[in-house]
Image (cartoon, grey):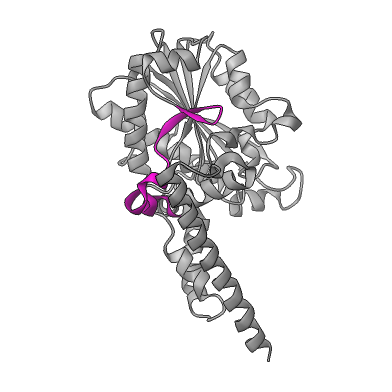
Amino acid sequence: MPRVVDHGIAGAVYAGIGVGMRGASLGLGAVATTGRGPRLEDSRAGRFLSRSVIGLVGDRLARERPTLAWPMSMRLEGADVAPDRESLAAAHPSAGPDLVVFLPGLCEDETAWDRQADRHGTTYPTALAAGGWTPLMLRANTGLAVQDNGALLAALLADVVGEWPVPVGRVALVGHSMGGLVARVACAVDAAGPAAWSPLVTDVVTIGTPHLGAPLAGWARSGSAGLARLPETSAFGRILDQRSVGILDLERGLDLDAAPALPHARMRLISGSVGSPGAPMARLATRALGDLLVRQSSATGGGRLFPDADLLHVAGADHFSLLNHPDVRRALLDWLDPGRHEDV
């Protein structure tokens, strides 16, 4: 009897998901086609749904429903900023020569950096702006391959640097999770072509980035096989099997052959771990769990990808706490002090 009940519940849930997804698809399609109806991103729940769907199936949206897929773009106050001189000057009336580019992670957008701003009283972009930097907030289709997003970012930054209202002096890239991988690829792509902005990069900061891969992506792969064996969970297994190529890239990570580091830029690698620093099991938790999504060894490149990098480990911080943490903020202000002139 319990098995029959389980089947009934599972069937109702899956049917509801199917109807909801079909309805959402039709509704989104109508808005995209006609421009009528409320924007999905006008509500907090809608924004969460948008960035989650983009991360999970953004590659398929780009192929099958491109009007619903996010382009790589700069964002300000919920709108895209075109990379031309007039638009950039209007969006940044106090534009300075030092640009810090913030890159979101999987299923995130430019608002991810606002996490717990009310609690901490500031954000990384705000703090660095007070220190003389001009923050540029990026949005990307995080369901695309890391290599594709890196190429898109390289092209966008070439336009931005070429059209910036004042001559650009320095560029720093700050990426959370997948954003750190995208930053590395963008630097490598630009350095391999007619370099327009990569010679200006002084710092690449990665925060909770799975340079050597993220085990949760692998667990999803093995979990999908297990879920597919049971009638009650087979639908979830199929969903996991169809996860985006962006998620698959997180499983693999990125070696130096795919994205060599810029020889003149300083690598700054930030990792986190759960649990209290003084707890007896803290060291084991750091090695096995990391920040719950990325292990410390992966976030630091295992000590072999970037042997000369500056490292910061934040104990007691999970993957998303790293988006706005006092220790990380202090490190950013120290590393990116425009008054410092390091030979890197």
Image-based side of 254 in relation to 176, left or right: left
> Magenta residues, as a range?
57-80
Residue found 45% across the figure and 10% down from its top: 97
- Specify whether residue 13 is painted magenta: no
Q: Nearer the viewer, residue 335 or 284?
A: 335
Q: Is residue 226 above or below residue 255?
A: below
Q: Between residues 180 and 49, which one lies in front from this camera angle?
A: 49
- Identify which residue is drawn at 41% across, 11% down: 169
Residue 255 appears in which quarter of the rendering? top left
Seen as rendered, the residue at the extreme bottom is 1
Residue 343 seen in render: no
Q: Is residue 306 above or below residue 203?
A: below
329 with respect to 258 (left or right): right
Where does the image place residue 9, in percent across and percent down from the top left?
64, 78
Image coordinates for residue 331, horizontal then vertical, percent: 61, 25
- x, y percent for residue 219: 51, 63
Residue 270 percent location from the top left of the image: 56, 35
Query: Which quarter of the rendered picture does the N terminus lie within?
Result: bottom right
Q: Residue at x 33, y 30 (%)?
A: 154
Q: Is residue 148 visible?
A: yes
Q: Is residue 76 magenta?
A: yes
